[in-house]
Image (spheres, helix red, strand yellow):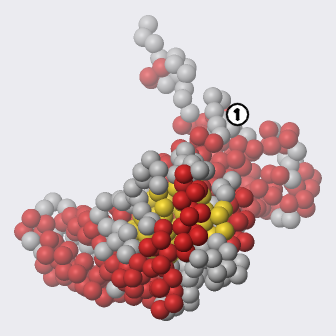
Amino acid sequence: MFQSLGDRLQNVFDGLRGRGKLSEADVKAALREVRIALLEADVNLEVARDLVARVQAKAVGSETLMSLNPDQRVVAIVHEELVEVLGGKAVQPQLRNEGNVWMLVGLQGAGKTTTAAKLAHKYKSQGRRPLLVAADTQRPAAREQLRTLGRQIGVPVLEVADGEAVSITKQRVADALKQDFRDLIIVDTAGRSQIDEPLMNEMAALRDALQPTERILVIDAMTGQQSLPVAKSFDERVGVTGLILSKLDGDARGGAALSARHVTGKPILFAGMSEKIDGLEAFHPDRVAGRILGMGDVLTLIEKAKVLEADEEGPASGRAPTDFTLSDMLTQMRRIKQMGSFSDVLSMIPGAGKLLPAGAQVDEREIGRVEAIISSMTERERREPRLLNASRRKRIARGSGTTVQDVNRLVKNYEEMRTMMKRFGKRPPGRGGRMGRARP
């Protein structure tokens, strides 16, 4: 979502690098470009203006302009202010030992139902006993959707019947907390295509009955600034305690994400990063700011890798680099796919985006082609690629729906990867090289 904005800002700062010394005019000119980039990304006007003013106040001073690396200092100040705009420190909902009731509110289509299931899945994996409450009686398919998601993640769903009195819903939730020993109730409420009085009255009545410990507003990050007045209305009537930005993996300009915290005054708790049930991440302002400015997000990348390592040991674990097979290559590529799109993974690696030519796009379909090609090989061919003569490569291309050139390119990439792994693999002591040679 922040790709376009990130590219614009990085181009602005690239223009400051290598000058050795910056003048006040240089900094002000760069910050004018930063402001334009923010406005074009659909960032709220007040937010863009305030951010640039704070950066200018800190950057236009002797301490910055006379430093050894003034360009880096300016970028650091922009990073600090972006972090502040996004909320400063990461905030997560407070969980008690029991009696946790979270009420999700928002407009229709914001992603409340899917987000409710993602939250249940997330906290179930942490040892909680969640219960989903399907309280959206306005959208015909909402209860069925939550029921399906509940089965998928192994979490029970309490369905509110059409016309059910709020007092009955309150009692059923209370019974689930006490009798079924549920320690986290997540309520999926109704929405409308726009704010209206009946919706707000319904939300207020449900809030008064359930007394939720968290009232979380789900905002569709794709809607841009249009979502901000909605956030204010829900806060005034329901009393929002935090925000979840859904669809943050989309290709919108990202203005809502940068404006939501500043405009509403409420912390962003989570971000929806994919349609997958595990595609919900804690929102870290410093990491998001780093990704926007091309500094990467190594911590999130490490966390994702650790989750995958916990699920399954590496295929080449404990083996020599020369034992790396085509099956191992396929497994590693699938793991990267589990961590998100190639573009997302690249954005988490500092400076990786600059390795691609300007405007170049990563072909996300390449993993599918690789999988099809390797799946069309026999087990022996995967272990011993030297067997892949011309006739075998033609057979594999036909079986995978690709071309012989695709197969050749894959084998070449594999050989390069294997050579690189061998080069960086550990050399046994005493086997050549200055470090391993014993003195006579």
Left or right, residue 264 beside residue 173: left
Residue 82 visible in image: no
Q: Residue at x 49, y 53 (%)?
A: 301
Location of residue 432 in the rendering, given as x and y in whole percent from the top left corner: 53, 22
Question: 141 and 247: which one is in front?
Answer: 141
250 versus 182 height, above or below: below
* Residue appearing at x 48%, y 68% in the figure: 210
Residue at 48% of width from left, 64% of height from top?
102
**Quadrant position of residue 363:** bottom right
Circle 1 packing at 10 Å, graded few (<14), some (14-19), many (20+), is: some
Residue 282 visible, this orientation: yes
In the shown orientation, is residue 251 left or right of residue 438?
Answer: right
Residue type, mark 1 in image = Asp
Q: How many marks?
A: 1
Residue annotated with mark 1: 323
Q: Position of residue 238 (x, y in %)?
A: 41, 78
To which quarter of the image does residue 426 belong? top right
Is 187 or 167 nearer to us in this picture?
Answer: 167
Q: Is residue 16 left or right of residue 8?
A: left
Q: Pinpoint residue 144: horizontal percent, then vertical percent.
A: 72, 72
Expressed as whole percent of the image width and height from the top left, the position of residue 49 reads: 25, 85
Quadrant placement of the C terminus: top left
Vertical comparison of 428 with 417: above or below = above
| Residue shown at the point (44%, 89%) measured from the top left | 226
Instruction: Determine whether the residue tagged by mark 1 lies in a helix, strand or loop.
Output: helix
